[in-house]
Image (cartoon, rainbow, N blue to C red):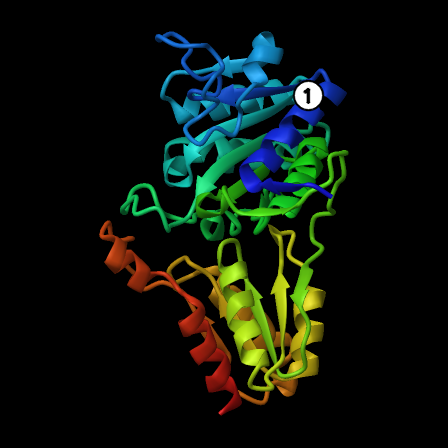
Amino acid sequence: MPEKTMRDAINEALHQAMEQDESVFVIGEDVAGCNGSAGDVGSVGGVFGVTTGIYNRWPDRCVDTPISESAIVGAAAGAALVGMRPVAEIMFADFIGVCMDQIVNQMAKFRYMFGGKSRCPAVIRFSAGGGFSAAGQHSQAMYQVMTSFPGLKVVVPSNAYDAKGLLLTAIQDDDPVLFFEPKVLYQETAEVPDEMYTIPFGQANFVREGDDVTVVAFGQMVPKAAAAIDALAAEGISCDLIDPRTTSPLDENAILESVQATGRLVVVDEAPPRCGLTADIAGLAADRAFSSLTAPIKQVCAPHSPTPFSPELEAAYLPDADKITAAIKATLA
């Protein structure tokens, strides 16, 4: 099976979805690359190169837009209502505030407000998270915020294989899907089939299996947690590592069954702690698996602060393998 980066896996998924279904189109800033400026149109394919080559193959289905997130998402919502399957790109998840009304008060509520008679099969892609030294306005995860709104499906892949399968599932879904791509993982590789495949939403992945501690991690924290767990194996400590893949729907059963088996829980996310996913998962376990817990739940996340620009400060700000290791050992103390 060929090795592919997450960037290439997402690009391949977009190409294959557009080959299969003429209603799929791409819309966003610079998705055509160099359109309206010097250079070969289509050569760039977005700020991270994810849509490279799409304009060259389907110039009428690759819509390059002005810098207006509200226009991008509003157009995608309207197109979805009349039978198209748009894949909108918002360069950075931080800009979700600009199109919040279109997402939260429109797309998320169409099916509910119209008595189930409408559907909104739109996907909105975001580059998300820290690790690029991109400072406070270009480093937020934001998926933890959007998970709180009903009517939206929220996806956070942690590797290239999942990214392709989950994106193909998202494009085929009849509800709005927010697809958060940890940008620090764009260059990370995994084995990815050439053919199309899908991964069901709400089905967590057990990245590691063990008996001592349950570790739940999201996005770019999954490989960091895996590194910590692999190192602890040399000390005789084994852990379940659960990657939920989707935060809405959430595979609650997988988490609860693991906690009931291990009796210990560590939750890892790069977002700040207040009203976040670490608190949500901790609350779920405390509410529904309390009698199984043999130690306090540990949350490993960033401080309640904007992301610093300095590479040294950002490295200290984000959770890493050492912090995850310390949390796992604390539950075993």
Q: Quadrant of residue 124?
A: top right
**Could you tell me residue 88's position as x and y percent?**
53, 26
In this view, 65 is above or below 187: above
Residue 109 seen in the current view? no
Rendered residue at 52%/43% (across/down): 180
- Determine the secondary structure under disc 1: helix
**Could you tell me residue 212's position as x and y percent?**
62, 83
Q: Quadrant of residue 98?
A: top left
In this view, 220 is above or below 56: below
Which of the pair 105/297 is nearer the observer? 297
**Horizontal relation, residue 311 to residue 102: left or right:** left
Residue 171 seen in the current view? yes
**Could you tell me residue 105's position as x and y percent?**
50, 35
Which of the pair 242/201 is nearer the observer? 242
**Could you tell me residue 314's position as x and y percent?**
29, 56
Which of the pair 266/322 is nearer the observer? 322
Which of the pair 305/195 is nearer the observer? 195
Report which residue position mark 1 lands on.
18
Q: Residues within 10 Å of mark 1 (few under 14, many from 20)?
A: many
Rendered residue at 41%/28% (across/down): 47
Q: Name which residue type carries label 1.
A: Met
- The quarter of the picture where the N terminus appears is top right
Q: Quadrant of residue 2?
A: top right
